[in-house]
Amino acid sequence: MEYAKGRIGRVFTVRIDHGDDLILELIKLAELEEIESAVFVLLGALKEGKLVTGPKENRRPPIPTWSGFDDVHEILGIGDIFLEEGKPKVHLHAGTGREDSVKLGCLRGESEVFMVVEVFILEIEGIAAERVMDMEQGFAPVSFGRSHDRG
């Protein structure tokens, strides 16, 4: 286990509008506001989305199992933002549903908003964290450096 201790910095309340790409808008905001470490929750609806719903087999590196939808689904999610190779990387796990169809997974790729998605971002200050590729695991987990204060 690795961990870092920090504190809540800026808090953002964000509205992402109909037709926007949810993940791209979060990345653009992180770049604009220079968000390096954050956690967020969101709710709303998506017109389409693609989810990784687990590995095909219990082995590393994993081969992902994909699931998606191209009709409106409600969404409820939690995620984080950390830098990967100097750029913001959004990691979002979400539950989506429409009538009796419910999916849960890691939202990746295109994610077009239907009507609105509301996002509440809590910036984390006082930590040095970034995603670093681990070829054995097949993904870039969060790694922690020395703690620092940005003021």
Image: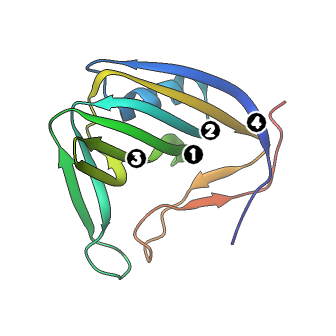
Q: Residue 137 placed where, x, y %?
A: 44, 74
Residue at image coords 21%, 32%: 72
Label whose residue precedes the other's in the sequence (1 or 3): 1
Report which residue position mark 3 lands on: 94
Amino acid type at circle 1 is Phe
- Crowd around label 1: few <14 · some 14–19 · many ≥20 (10 Å): many
Q: Name the mark nearer the viewer: 3 or 4.
A: 3
Question: Marks 4 and 2, how far apart in space?
Answer: 13 Å
Label whose residue precedes the other's in the sequence (3 or 4): 4
Q: Is residue 81 above or below residue 61?
A: above
Q: Is residue 77 left or right of residue 72?
A: right
Amino acid type at circle 2 is Glu
Report which residue position mark 1 lands on: 82
Residue at image coords 82%, 45%: 148
Badge 2 vs badge 1, beta-carbon distance below 8 Å: yes
Label whose residue precedes the other's in the sequence (2 or 1): 2
Task: Look at the image and tell me in which quarter the C terminus lies.
Answer: top right
Label 3 SS: strand
- Crowd around label 4: few <14 · some 14–19 · many ≥20 (10 Å): few
Question: Marks 1 and 3, how far apart in space?
Answer: 18 Å
Report which residue position mark 4 lands on: 8
Amino acid type at circle 3 is Ala
Most foreground residue, 43 or 98: 98
Label 1 SS: strand
Badge 1 vs badge 3, beta-carbon distance below 8 Å: no
Question: Marks 1 and 4, how far apart in space?
Answer: 15 Å
